[in-house]
Image (tube, helix red, strand yellow):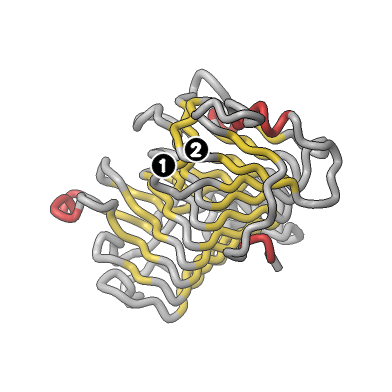
Amino acid sequence: MYPQLSTKQQPFNAIVSKNKKPGAYRTVTEAIAAAPVYSATKYYIHVEAGLYKERVEVWKNKLTNIVLVGDGQLTTKISWNRRAPYFRTYDTATVLIRGDGFIAKFLTFENSAGDGSQAVAVASLSNQSAFFQCTFLGYQDTLHPKRGFQFYRECNIYGTVDFIFGAAAAIFQSCNLFSRLPSTITFTAQNKQDTNITSGFVIQNCTFTVAPGMERQKPLIKAYLGRPWSDFSTVVVMESYLDDIIQPTGWLSWGNTTTDKLTYYEFRNHGPGAATSKRVN
């Protein structure tokens, strides 16, 4: 479905560099702004190693089929620090993607605002978007698959409260979901609002655990697979490793949201948090 995720790299159409390389752009924003509008083919932008402190937007319709390729999650990072309540939640995003067909590979996206309020690293409204070997760093509301069909493979996602949230139809495959402090963690907050909408999260062959270096703080953490943002919230967790931070009830309620229309499935998971005998009904 996504041949552009293969390790064989296409020629780059543009380069972003911190090293004043001739012909290269200095910022990711400049490189995206120079891309052709309404492109029917992929436009490849190489983001070389470095810390890029900027907020990036990929505009709807005008900028389609943008592909960002970094030099690795440990070496190429885009970082900014917007947070609520000073901005609407999805406008806090370090990278806000509206143009369809967006792809990112070998990059880290960070919202460095810290804990305490919503601060999104990536908000994607891009239909048929995909992320491969990317890291998303944040606390509350780290990753916002807002709508459309989206695919995440071999990604690292860090957060605390509702840190994967939205109404997209999104698949997470072979990803690490890392909880950070404070103590009460909700990995997902899915926002399907109607039975006629194609919306839901499928999390397959993933790992739910604490962030590296936090192993000794496990006793302080109470984690839940998710809570329902809307009445028809839909999440499937399958063939994944659930660490012992996952509470026996598995899922958490949210205010006045009804629970009789939810779709929460667990299938063939393993690990100390995978037992379902005490799950909520």
Q: Residue furthest top?
A: 86
Q: Residue furthest left?
A: 216
Q: Please tell me which residue is depicted at 50% across the width and 66% down the height of the picture.
A: 203
- Name the kind of residue labelled 2 in the image: Ala
Residue 21, above or below 164? above
Q: Nearer the viewer, residue 104 or 118?
A: 104
Left or right for 138, reference 248: right
Percent across and percent down for residue 187 are: 42, 53
Left or right for 86, reference 276: right
- Where disc 2 sits, the SS reads loop
Q: Residue furthest front?
A: 22
Percent across and percent down for residue 93 are: 55, 33
Which residue, given by chain and number where applicable, does mark 2 sit on? 121
Q: If the image is split into quadrants, where does the N terminus sit?
A: bottom right
- Name the kind of residue labelled 1 in the image: Leu
Q: Please tell me which residue is depicted at 54% across the width and 54% down the height of the picture.
A: 258
Which residue, given by chain and number where applicable, does mark 1 sit on? 137
Asked whether disc 2 touches disc 1, contact meaning CB atoms under 8 Å apart, the reply is yes
For residue 132, what is the image quadrant? Answer: bottom right
Percent across and percent down for residue 130 are: 63, 55
Q: Earlier in the sequence, mark 2 or mark 1?
A: 2
- Where disc 1 sits, the SS reads strand
Q: Nearer the viewer, residue 233 or 246?
A: 246
